[in-house]
Amino acid sequence: MPSRYPGAISQDWEPVVLNKSKAKAQQLRDPKAVNQALRSGAPVQTVKKFDGGSNKKAAPALNTKKLEEGTEPGSLERVPGEVRQVIQKARLEKKMSQAELAKLINERPQVVQEYENGKAVPNQAVLAKMEKVLGVKLRGKIGKR
């Protein structure tokens, strides 16, 4: 049987070195890796980030309860009661849900709900859209067109 390899077959005795890839930043931040480095005596650098890891927002400058009560000069104007009633009455006359009205005026259902509950700060653009869809006057003298 003829050999497949012509000539002498020789072995390569030079060592093969496999290098580990460098640890990625995410792996270096792993608590296990940090603890292992501390135990082995390797230098570990820790940096405290400003507001790092906290999910808290800065406290508001004005007391929000006072703002709600309207006793502080920074209180915001809310939707008047008569506007709320006109919106709700017109919507029910057209047999629409709050979600349907919201879809027609390209707003979220939450916005319509806030207007009907009187919690929203009046936005002229939203009121104009509601006037157009419901066919009632919501700005100026309120009532039917």
Image (cartoon, rainbow, N blue to C red):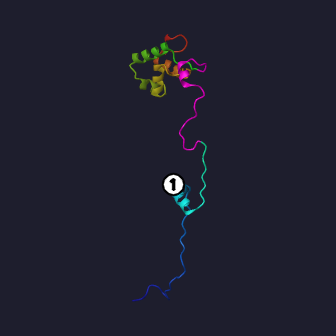
Tally of numbered tags? 1
Tell me where residue 69 appears, x and y as whole percent.
Answer: 53, 19
Describe the element under mark 1 as helix, strand or loop. helix
Q: Quadrant of the N terminus?
A: bottom left
Q: Residue at x 53, y 71 (%)?
A: 18
Dot 1 crowding, Cα within 10 Å, few <14, some 14–19, many 20+: few
User: What predominant SS class does the magenta segment belong to?
Assistant: loop
Residue 138 within the segment the image draws in magenta: no
Q: Position of residue 27 (x, y in %)?
A: 53, 57
Q: Residue at x 60, y 59 (%)?
A: 43
How far from the left and from the top, in percent, is residue 33?
Answer: 52, 58
Q: Eyeballing the image, is 17 above or below 124?
A: below
Which residue is identified by label 1? Answer: 31
- Foreground residue among 1 and 44: 44
Q: Is residue 133 visible?
A: no
Q: Residue at x 42, y 18 (%)?
A: 91
Relative height, residue 31 to residue 17 (above, below): above
Please tell me which residue lies in front, 109 or 63: 63
Residue 70 x, y percent position in the rendering: 55, 18
From this viewpoint, is residue 120 visible? yes
Callout 1 amino acid: Pro
Q: Is residue 47 above or below residue 127?
A: below
Residue closer to the observer: 1 or 143 = 143
Nearest the viewer among 79 and 30 is 30
Range of the magenta residues?
Answer: 51-74
